[in-house]
Amino acid sequence: MTATVAIVEDDSALRQVLSRGLREEGFEVPVCVSTGSDLLRRIDAAAPEVFIVDIGLPDVDGRDLCMAIRARGVEAPVLFLTARGSITDRLAGFHSGADDYLPKPFHFDELVVRLRALIRRSASQRPTPPGLHLDPATHTVRDGDRAAALTPTEFRILALLLARRGEVIRRRTLINAAWPPGAMVHDNTLDAYIVRLRRKLTELGQAGLITTIRGVGYSIS
């Protein structure tokens, strides 16, 4: 199976091993970088079919990077390859939009099998930017030349809404994505963050972007 893989791993030795090993297995590796910012600069041109992402990157949290990828309309599967293997870390990874999670240390053959399984199940498409672009390194949202700073929580809420445009996202789903697993978050806390997001989006000329579905959650159409 020939497929394109993007690797985001800050350990240079492991990055080289992954790139060389995957090429020997018949994969193409058009993107092999150490930071999330490097990936986002090259993602449109490369259009990878699957991503391998380390969570502990030097410039961003890999989970925020995953949410930024999803917010751009990229549906290709994301596999987290990380030393953070606790159940809390796994849940946070899946809530951020990842499709698989392989803790370090790992067997290379298992990684290859998981990648091929993800690609078979994927109906990946070329990225279709929604107009707004999220930067996980600076936690900002940009529309053209204008940008607004976001808190990490605001970033994650907006990223999920953009990633699932046209869907009604339930309140609990938003809370699970934006706050650590097990955090006690009241409904009015989420509402307060939505108010803040709406204010910032209005400043970018995107007033009315977030719709309230009473009793259910929120949506971006």
Image (cartoon, rainbow, N blue to C red):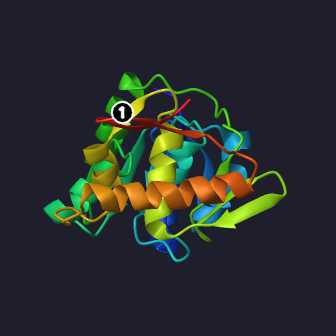
Count of labels in the image: 1
Residue 160 visible? yes
Is 57 or 119 nearer to us in this picture? 57
**Furthest-bottom residue in view?**
58
Is 138 or 174 nearer to us in this picture? 174
109 to 178, vertically: above or below: above
Q: Residue at x 52, y 77 (%)?
A: 58
Q: Residue at x 36, y 33 (%)?
A: 118
Is 79 or 91 nearer to us in this picture? 91
Q: Could you say where residue 92 lies in the image, as x and y percent from the top left?
A: 28, 58
Q: Which of the 4 image quarters holds residue 218?
A: top left
Would you call the spot at circle 1 few (<14 residues within 10 Å), some (14-19), or many (20 or more)? many
Q: Quadrant of the C terminus?
A: top right
Q: Could you say where residue 65 lies in the image, as x and y percent from the top left?
A: 51, 58
Going by the image, does 80 lie left or right of 11? left
200 to 109, vertically: above or below: below
**Furthest-right residue in view?**
145
46 to 104, vertically: above or below: above
Q: Which of the 4 image quarters holds residue 169?
A: top left
Residue 108 visible? no
Q: Which residue is mark 1?
A: 118
Is 167 or 85 nearer to us in this picture? 167
Q: Which of the 4 image quarters holds residue 78?
A: top left
Q: Could you say where residue 189 lies in the image, as x and y percent from the top left?
A: 33, 62
Going by the image, does 75 lie left or right of 188? right
Q: Residue at x 70, y 45 (%)?
A: 206
Tag 1: amino acid: Leu
Q: Could you say where residue 161 lies in the image, as x and y percent from the top left?
A: 48, 42
Q: Disc 1 on helix, strand or loop?
A: helix
